[in-house]
Image: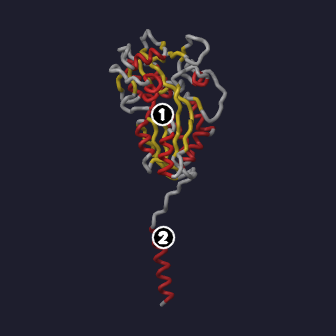
Amino acid sequence: MRAYLVGSIFILLLVSCKSTPEKAMDTPNEGQIRISVEASFRPFMEEQLKVFLESNPKAQIEVSYKSEIDCFKDLANDSTRMIFVTRGLNKQEQADYKKSLSFNPNFAILAYNAVAVLVNKSAKDSIFSLEELKQRLTGKSNKEVVMDGNNLTGIIRFLKDSLAKDTTFGNNVVAANGSKEVIDYIATHADAIGFVGMNWIGDGYDPAQIELRKKVKLGLVECTQCLEKGYFSKPSPATISKAQYPLTLPIYYILKENAAGLGTGFLNFLSLERGQLIFKRSFLVPAKMGFKKRNSLLE
């Protein structure tokens, strides 16, 4: 009788173990995580994810492209492991996460992007000082300015902090629905200027970006770091690296992971040679690895 009971219990435990779903593995090479990405980063992030997932077939990364503000909101959500934005965590945010998580999220710069100033092909005025751009943004010059306002990208925060500062944007600032719509708007409005990330317009090898470049032209912006006065430049990897283009902004990752999981695996990929080369091929400036500079097609 005792042997029968022991056998029955063993069978029940075995059936119970088989019927319990296996917990998904979460290692640097496999598992499932959610990430949120600043909407203007979409072109290069899609390429990064494509290469990483092809190399790690057991990995699943669910990505959402949205405003920078919403990315930070997602980071506070337990289900979102990693975000990509244009700034790191400030001291108060670090303290809050330390209190809630018992550890600080990891964050640093992966690469450098730039804010390109776009003008119509027929525009006579394509050279701008920072003061002139400020006059446009704050409405002291009534000519239209268009940017990706619907997504509230990090570019808007950057322009507010670095150019408009304590002044609100003027009524002449128009909100477009996405970076491509900014380009389309400038293509049909002769007196307007637009702001987009260089990663949307700077790749001289991408057929889609080559077509977009046919619609508009890049404005030149005053170099504030140059010894030579009156020097103006277009955004390019070379002018970013030499600090000749002033509207430069970083690409940050913020990783909420206290062990080596899939988020760490993706971060390692982005930080090492293959990921950094993808940034370079996207005409951005890699921050983690040094590459010999070559002449840019935008110069």
Question: Taking 68 as reference, is 111 left or right?
Answer: right
- Could you tell me if residue 57 is visible in this image? no
Q: In terms of depth relative to the viewer, which is nearer, 142 or 168?
A: 168
Residue sitting at x 41%, y 23%: 183
Crowd tier of the residue under label 2, counting other residues whose Cα lies within 10 Å: few below 14, some 14–19, many 20 or above: few
Crowd tier of the residue under label 1, counting other residues whose Cα lies within 10 Å: few below 14, some 14–19, many 20 or above: many
The amino acid at mark 2 is Cys
Residue sitting at x 36%, y 17%: 139
Q: Position of residue 151 (x, y in %)?
A: 38, 33
In the rendered image of this protein, does residue 203 appear above or below residue 263? Answer: above
Q: CA distance from mark 2 to mark 1?
A: 44 Å
| Helix, strand or loop at mark 1 | helix
Q: In terms of depth relative to the viewer, which is nearer, 226 or 199?
A: 226
Residue 17 is marked as 2
Question: Taking 242 as reference, is 210 left or right?
Answer: left
The answer to which quarter of the image holds residue 155 is top left
Residue sitting at x 40%, y 25%: 147
The amino acid at mark 1 is Phe
Q: Earlier in the sequence, mark 2 or mark 1?
A: 2
Residue lying farthest left?
A: 171
Q: Position of residue 161 (x, y in %)?
A: 45, 27
- Could you tell me if residue 82 is visible in this image? yes
Question: Taking 112 as reference, is 76 left or right?
Answer: left
Q: In terms of depth relative to the viewer, which is nearer, 221 or 267?
A: 221
| Helix, strand or loop at mark 2 | helix
Q: Position of residue 241 (x, y in %)?
A: 60, 25
Q: Are marks 2 and 1 in contact (CB under 8 Å)?
A: no
In the rendered image of this protein, does residue 202 appear above or below residue 126? Answer: below
Q: Which residue is mark 1?
A: 41
Q: In terms of depth relative to the viewer, which is nearer, 115 or 55?
A: 115
The answer to which quarter of the image holds residue 295 is top right
